[in-house]
Image: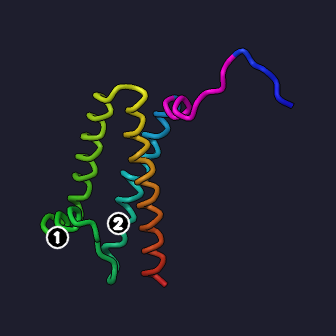
């Protein structure tokens, strides 16, 4: 049974904006830490290589620890972008990093699973 309330139901954008801090947390956990750890583990295995053209070259030249500095650079640039983009559009910055981080970390886990079986 439907009933009327005095407050309108929040839109999806409102929910995302209200959860912006959680999106940043997911971005740091998955894009920052999850991708970094799973990539570092994968690079120690015989048949696993970094396929990202930029990251692959940076790792070849500077070693795997350069990934940390690349992650820091990406987060600094994204935070700067987040600061200058007006609300509610800026929620796309942590949302994009969070979604990308989850997908890349899951993909890395799949690759690790295939490489170790």
**Residue 81 position within the rendered picture, expressed as x and y whole percent measured from the top left:** 28, 35
Mark 2–mark 1 distance (CA, rounded to whole Å): 14 Å
Q: Residue at x 26, y 47 (%)?
A: 74
Residues in magenta? Answer: 7-17
**Residue 79 position within the rendered picture, expressed as x and y whole percent measured from the top left:** 30, 36
In the displayed structure image, the side of residue 117 where residue 80 appears, left or right:
left
In the displayed structure image, the side of residue 61 where residue 12 appears, left or right:
right
**SS for tag 1?**
helix
Quadrant assignment, res 95: top left
Q: Which residue is mark 1?
A: 60
| The stretch drawn in magenta includes residue 13 | yes
Q: Residue at x 33, y 66 (%)?
A: 40
Q: Residue at x 12, y 67 (%)?
A: 61
Seen in the picture, residue 79 relative to 64 is either above or below; the reply is: above
Q: Residue at x 49, y 30 (%)?
A: 17
Q: Residues within 10 Å of mark 2 (few under 14, many from 20)?
A: many
Q: Residues within 10 Å of mark 1 (few under 14, many from 20)?
A: few
Q: 98 or 7, which is in the foreground? A: 7
Seen in the picture, residue 83 relative to 22 is either above or below; the reply is: above
Q: Which residue is mark 2?
A: 39
């Amino acid at each position: 049974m439907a009933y009327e309330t005095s407050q309108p139901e929040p839109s999806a954008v409102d929910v995302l904006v209200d959860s912006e801090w959680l999106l940043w947390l997911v971005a740091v956990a998955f894009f920052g830490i999850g991708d970094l750890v799973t990539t570092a583990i994968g690079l120690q295995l015989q048949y696993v290589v970094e396929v990202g053209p930029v990251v692959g070259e940076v790792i070849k030249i500077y070693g795997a620890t350069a990934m940390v500095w690349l992650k820091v650079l990406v987060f600094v640039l994204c935070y700067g972008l987040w600061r200058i983009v007006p609300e509610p559009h800026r929620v796309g910055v942590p949302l994009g990093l969070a979604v990308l981080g989850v997908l890349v970390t899951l993909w890395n886990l799949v690759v690790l699973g295939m490489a170790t079986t």
